[in-house]
Image (cartoon, helix red, strand yellow):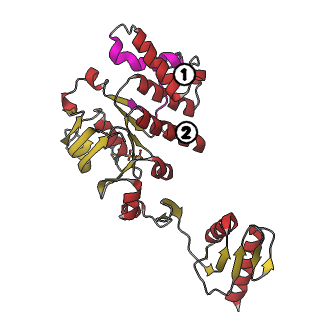
Amino acid sequence: MKKNNETIKISGLETGYISKKGNTVITRDIDASLESGELTCLLGPNGAGKSTLLKTLTAFIPPIQGDIFIEGKSLKDYSAPELAKVIGVVLTEKLSISNMTVEELISMGRSPYTGFWGKMSEYDKMAVEESINLVNINNLRGRMVQTLSDGERQKVMIAKALAQETPVIFLDEPTAFLDYPSKVEILQLLKRLAIEKDKTVFLSTHDMELALQIADKVWLIDKPHGVTIGTPEDLALNGEMNRYFHSDGVVFDIDNGLFKISQEMHGSVSLTGEGQHLNMVRKALTRRGISTAEKDSSVFVEATPRCLSVNGRDVKSIAELLDEIDSIIDNDNNS
Ligand SMILES: Nc1ncnc2c1ncn2[C@@H]1O[C@H](COP(=O)(O)OP(=O)(O)OP(=O)(O)O)[C@@H](O)[C@H]1O
């Protein structure tokens, strides 16, 4: 198996905003690294400091303290043209550019190499072609950029970053404003690029559930705790996931490694059965605030592909089953 390399090392980093009136520290004591061939997701609540960290890592703003090393060299020792050859940045903002085709925009990814007049060599053209193919957007190449949908534009911006041929790609909320299948498609694309092209991919997102399913590593950031790093599974097992995202309405379900809406239970049944019917009935009951953990309940529910029943009485659907259980629980409560 191929060994991943440490492309970014962060040491004693303090992010924030420097002004004459005094520094505003956002996150302190960040010691971390990013590796090639991996997709890393930065998760945290609104205002936690995700954009501030990304801006610091991409040299838009300086660190208040500490250092960032990219391929062994301190970020502050890179000139802007040198940096453009190691870091590609994809932002979510709408494009200010218009009247340009997708292919022309992707070609701009070659500007760190094409010099002042922007003359494209055969190699530059080949790099653009390869990026278009990798992201699978040949059908978009002639389109004017202002006519693209959010998802299409996101793919084009990723292709532009690929054309830049940098070992590292940073993306600020690349899944924002996309519908669910497009979010999945973009994250899968980024994961594939990390593996196939050995890129270091680091992105911020609010799509926790998706990130936990696809990321190789997760960085959890919030103001009281700073940054905590691990695989999604380690962070689940050591309780960090729950600690970071605990709120009254949400609990981390350690059994499936995803978040679920916490429900106040106001009744219980004894549930038996098998297969998808059992799972769906359990889900419906939990949604209704009825616990299925109770083995000694006086309400017996059976859910199999052949039989849906409550206390031996057959019902035709889960809706009918819920009504039946509700009436039994109501009667019990009133008597
Ligand atoms: N130029 C600035 N000067 C001072 N404070 C700032 C500046 N820009 C942002 N902040 C503050 O830094 C904190 C972190 O903001 P940041 O945008 O990094 O959070 P975020 O995690 O990206 O949030 P969101 O998920 O809402 O995009 C916030 O309290 C914000 O108000």
Quarter of the figure with the N terminus: top left
Q: Position of residue 307 (x, y in %)?
A: 77, 72
Range shown magenta: 89-115
Above or below 30: residue 98: above
Report which quarter residue 332 is drawn in.
bottom right
Mark 2 residue crowding within 10 angstroms, few (<14) / some (14–19) / many (20+): some
Q: Is residue 101 left or right of residue 320?
A: left
| Label 1, label 2: how far apart the Cα atoms are | 20 Å
Q: Which residue is mark 2?
A: 185
Q: Position of residue 94 (x, y in %)?
A: 49, 30
In the rendered structure, which amino acid carries the disc numbered 1?
A: Val
In the image, is residue 245 part of the stretch drawn in magenta? no
Ligand 1 shows up in the quarter that is top left
Mark 1 residue crowding within 10 angstroms, few (<14) / some (14–19) / many (20+): many
Q: Which mark is residue 145?
A: 1
Q: Position of residue 267 (x, y in %)?
A: 62, 80
Q: Is residue 170 left or right of residue 290?
A: left
